[in-house]
Each structure stands twice: as C-alpha cells, then as structure tokens.
Amino acid sequence: MLNISNNNRVAPENLDRYKTVKELKTRPHYRILNRIITILSILAFVALFLPWTQNISGKGAVTTLKPNQRPQSIQSVISGRIEKWYVQEGDFVKKGDTILFISEIKEDYMDPNLVENTKNQLEAKQQALESYGSKVGALDNQIQAILSEQKLKLEQANNKLQQAQFKIKSDSIDLVAVKTQLKIATTQYNRAVQLNKEGLKPLTDVEEKRLKLQEVEAKIITQENKLLTSKNELINTKVELSRIDAEYGEKIAKAKSDQFTALSSQYDTDAQVNKLKNQYANYSIRNGMYYIRAAQNGYINRALQAGIGETIKEGTPIATIMPSEYDIAVETYVNPLDLPLISKGAKVRIWFDGWPTIVFSGWPNMSYGTFGGQIVAVENFISDNGKFRVLIAPDPDDLPWPKQISIGSGAQTIALLNTVPVWFEIWRILNGFPPDYYVANEQPSKSKEKK
C-alpha cells in the first residue's frame, strides 16, 4: 500500500535543541569562515564585471617572410656520381661557392673531348654553309651572265630579222621595176616590128629591141630568185630566234635547278649548324653542372647524401641550406570558426618557446614577454590539419623581436578582439557564440601625437 497520507509523514528533527549545534554558531572560526565566504562571493561578483579582452589563440612556428629565405634543399640538375665534398655541415657558404663535385655516368657524355669535338663539327658545318652560300652566289652570277648573253643574241637575231625584212622589201621593189622595164621593152619591140613592116625601121633595130627584151626577161627571173632567197633568210632568222629562246631557256633552267639544289643544301646545313650550336651550348653548360654551387649565402644544415661514389639522379636533394639573411615571421593556424575575424593588417601578440613569458589572455596589458605582430597574409584554402594558415610579421610600431629565436621554433599567438565584461565572456562560451569582431581605430590619439 502506498504511503501518501500526510498523517504518516515524520517531522524533521530540529537540531537546534542540541548543545553542540548551538555552540557552533558562537565559535570564532565559524564567524571568520562566514566572512571569508562573504568576501570571496563579493569579489567573485565584482570580477564578473571586470573588462575581458576577447581573443583568438593559435599555435605555430617561426618562419621567414619570403619563400626564398626559408630553408631549402640543394639539388643536382643532372645525374652523376659523387666524387668530392667541399663543405661540411655547419659551414657558411657564399653564393657561387662549390659544395660538391660529381662525375658523369651517362655514356652519351663520357667523352672527355666532347665539347671540343662538337666545336670542331660546328666549325666544319659552318664552313660547308659558307661554301654553299658561295655556290649559290656563283650560280646567281652565272644566271645573270646567261640572261645577258641571251639578250645580246636576241638583239642580234632581231637585227638580222629586220635586215631580211628590208631586203625582201628591196627585192620586191626591184622586181616591180624589172617588170616595168619588161613592159617597156615589150612595147618598144612591138613598135619596132610594126615600123619594120611599114619600112620605117631597119631590121637591125628590131633585133636590137628583141635582144633588150630578152635581157629584161632574164632579169625578172634573177630578181624573182633574189626575192625568194630573201624570204628564205627571213624564215631562217625567225627559226634562229626560236632556237636562241629554247637554248638559253634550257641553260637558265639548268642553272636555276643547280641553284635551288645548292639552296636546299645550304638550308639543311644551316639547320645542322643550329643543332650543333644547341648541342655545343648544352654540353658546355653541362660541364659547368658537375660542380654544384650554392645559390645564395647561408649555412649548410645537413648533408642528405653521404659517401664517395654514390650515384644520384637529377633533382635529388643533396644538402639543405639556411639563408643567412632573412626577414623573420610566424606562421600560425586558426580554426575555421575564427577565420572571418582575421584580416590582413590586424594586430597580434606573440610569445616564443624558450622565452620567459607571463601571459594573461584576457588582460594583455598585464602580460610579460609578448611581442607585437601584424598579419600580412591569410591562406584561403584549409590546411591538412583542418585549420587556416596565417602569416604574421613583426609590428613596426612595437618592440623588435628577439634575435636569439631560431627558424622552426614554436610560437603561440593571440589576436586581440573586442573588450567585454567577464560575465559576458562566460555567457558567450557557455552558449558557443563567436567573439565580437572589433575594428581598432587606426587614427592616433592626441597623447601619442604629443609624444
């Protein structure tokens, strides 16, 4: 049965009726304890209203501001075999100092006179190129001479053609004149015969006129033969013109063919010369790569390859070097939730591992051993650790960073945000709210201007 009745409840026992309990209230240390608890409660309540600087903390390491100032490896551009070391770990080297000497291991480059032989081949090809150039020039002169001779021959043949034409014209005129003489002689002969029949002319005159007529008739045949001969000479002159064109056209074509062949050989030799120049330059540069030199001033940190006679491939790291001149910086990582609160140019407080430091994250003015920094770069892509990388440089308006810190040593950062009461910060953390974004006033105060 359930006991739910008020009548069955037992009243709590009153301890004040005991003497020992009454004496507790009157003892001195009990009053002191009450005062301490009261004072602590008041202090805790007052502390809830103290100012608290919100911040974004991060962990990182010391690095350099520029990529070429960070530790880097010295690599071999060509493959080879280690023959001699000129440095040891910890040595300081200047730009251009020899670090290592390697020998050749590829059979295509093992000839000790490879560069000299390639140079001789290049010179021979250059001479051949000059010879082809001279041949092309000689053939060009030959073509010009043939063209000049063809021109003279054609002029001579044209003169003969004109002479033949003039001679045909002259012979034609002479033939017409002879025909006129024949007509006259025929008329005179007929008149003499008529007059002889009438008894007015003697027979001797008739015979004389007949003889003259026969002579004129003979002249006509001779003149016709001369005209035909002149026409044959005209035809021969035209044939000669065609022969000259064909003959000298063949000569010019042959000379141009030889010239084009020489030009083709010249271009081919020119390509071979350029190829040999390329090989000669490559071989000369490769000879200089047997001595591996320092790219900048720095300290040899570690030799990654050891021993004499060890074979290395191209691009193999041989040693690491730390530049002697660098601009120090700190790289740190922030959570993605805090990334919107980080901006380029924001102020950051930094303390380094191994450096005496007292840090109060909520009260940066009470901290000791921290140094000022300024954000110079924020990575836009998340890193492998799930955070965003931030690069911080020394703040020119703050104390300089210590020179004793080394590249790679640890560092912790605090990016300062808005100043709020302690109770608000506790309430924000319990609710998981982000910090308040705070933009500092960059205008200097009047007190700073006076200073």
Image (cartoon, rainbow, N blue to C red):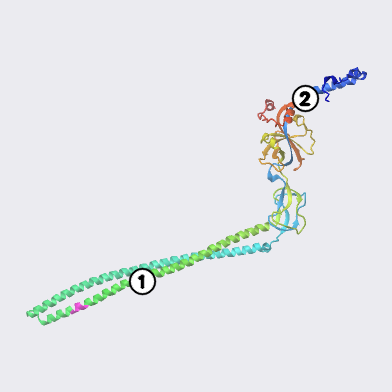
Q: In terms of image quadrants, where is residue 394? A: top right
| Residue at figure coordinates x 33%, y 68% from the top left | 159
Binning the other alpha carbons within 10 Å of mark 2 as few (below 14), some (14 to 19) or many (20 upward) gives some
Give percent across and percent down for residue 2: 83, 25
Q: In terms of image quadrants, where is residue 6? A: top right
Give percent across and percent down for residue 451: 70, 27
Cα separation, mark 1 vs mark 2, equals 129 Å
Query: What residue is pinned by disc 1?
Result: 240
Image: magenta residue range = 214-218
Q: In terms of image quadrants, where is residue 61? A: top right
Give percent across and percent down for residue 293: 71, 53
Which amino acid is tagged 1? Answer: Glu
Binning the other alpha carbons within 10 Å of mark 1 as few (below 14), some (14 to 19) or many (20 upward) gives some
Q: Earlier in the sequence, mark 1 or mark 2?
A: 2
Which amino acid is tagged 2? Answer: Ala
Query: What residue is pinned by disc 2?
Result: 47
